């Protein structure tokens, strides 16, 4: 079980989008790839004089590396051993080796104004298409998870009004498909 937290993003359901996501959390059960926790099907063996793009994965000396800067390889940037390898590669972490977060729930606190979607049990809870979530992490470094996307069904709504009359709604969702990570480039 992994837990992710963040601020910002959007929730869209019944064709309407919330005004502002104040904060969110996701609890996800993720499947890892079959061979080892660090295995990747798309990680080929590192090779000299090969053009690599940011986001490419290679294996070298039984370790998986992720390209962070596009380049043509040389001995100087060989992952894990070259004099300047950290300029071009980072060692892949477990987050980059997930087969997919297939079982997940989210709690999303949104601020709504008078023109925003009305938290409505009769509408939101029976929407066959579910909700579309875009949840931002606030991380902007190359290779960092920038935001998560997924579709979900609404399983709970808790509206409240603050002292200024602004409606704050806490939605709980159950994922109806995979949760997808999007990395910053």
Image (cartoon, grey):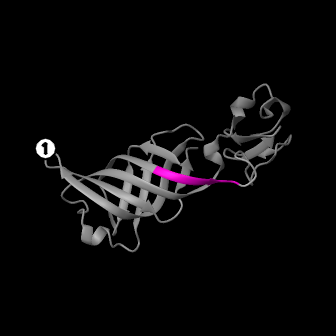
Q: Measuring from the top left, give residue 155's x and y in whole percent.
A: 35, 63
Q: Which residues are magenta?
A: 27-33
Q: Measuring from the top left, give residue 121's x and y in whole percent.
A: 26, 67
Query: Nearest the camera: 143 or 73?
Result: 143
- The local secondary structure at tag 1 comes to loop
In this rendering, is residue 116 above or below 21? below
What is the crowding at mark 1: few (fewer than 14 residues within 10 Å), some, or many (at least 20)?
A: few
Answer left or right for 147 relative to 112.
right
In this rendering, is residue 102 above or below 181? below
Q: Which residue is depicted at the point 81% across and 38% down? A: 73
Answer left or right for 10 relative to 34.
left
Is residue 70 in view from this perspective? no
Residue 19, quarter of picture = bottom left
Q: Which residue is depicted at the point 48% across and 59% down? A: 150
Query: Nearest the camera: 170 or 142?
Result: 170
Q: Measuring from the top left, give residue 87's x and y in whole percent.
A: 69, 30
User: Can you identify the residue that label 1 sits on?
Assistant: 163
Q: Quadrant of the C terminus?
A: top right
């Amino acid at each position: 079980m992994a837990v992710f937290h963040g601020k910002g993003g959007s929730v869209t359901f019944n064709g309407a989008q919330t005004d502002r996501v104040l904060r969110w959390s996701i609890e996800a059960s993720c499947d890892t790839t079959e061979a080892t926790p660090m295995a990747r099907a798309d990680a080929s063996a590192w090779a000299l004089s090969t053009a690599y793009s940011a986001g490419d994965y290679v294996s070298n000396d039984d370790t998986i590396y992720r390209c962070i800067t596009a380049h043509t390889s040389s001995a100087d940037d060989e992952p894990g051993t070259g004099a300047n390898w950290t300029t071009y590669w980072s060692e892949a972490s477990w987050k980059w080796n997930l087969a997919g977060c297939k079982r997940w729930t989210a709690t999303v606190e949104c601020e709504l104004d008078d023109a925003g979607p009305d938290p409505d049990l009769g509408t939101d809870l029976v929407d066959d298409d579910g909700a579309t979530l875009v949840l931002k992490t606030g991380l902007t470094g190359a290779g960092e998870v920038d935001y998560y996307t997924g579709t979900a069904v609404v399983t709970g709504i808790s509206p409240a009004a603050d002292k200024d009359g602004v409606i704050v709604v806490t939605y709980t969702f159950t994922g109806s498909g995979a949760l997808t990570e999007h990395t910053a480039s």
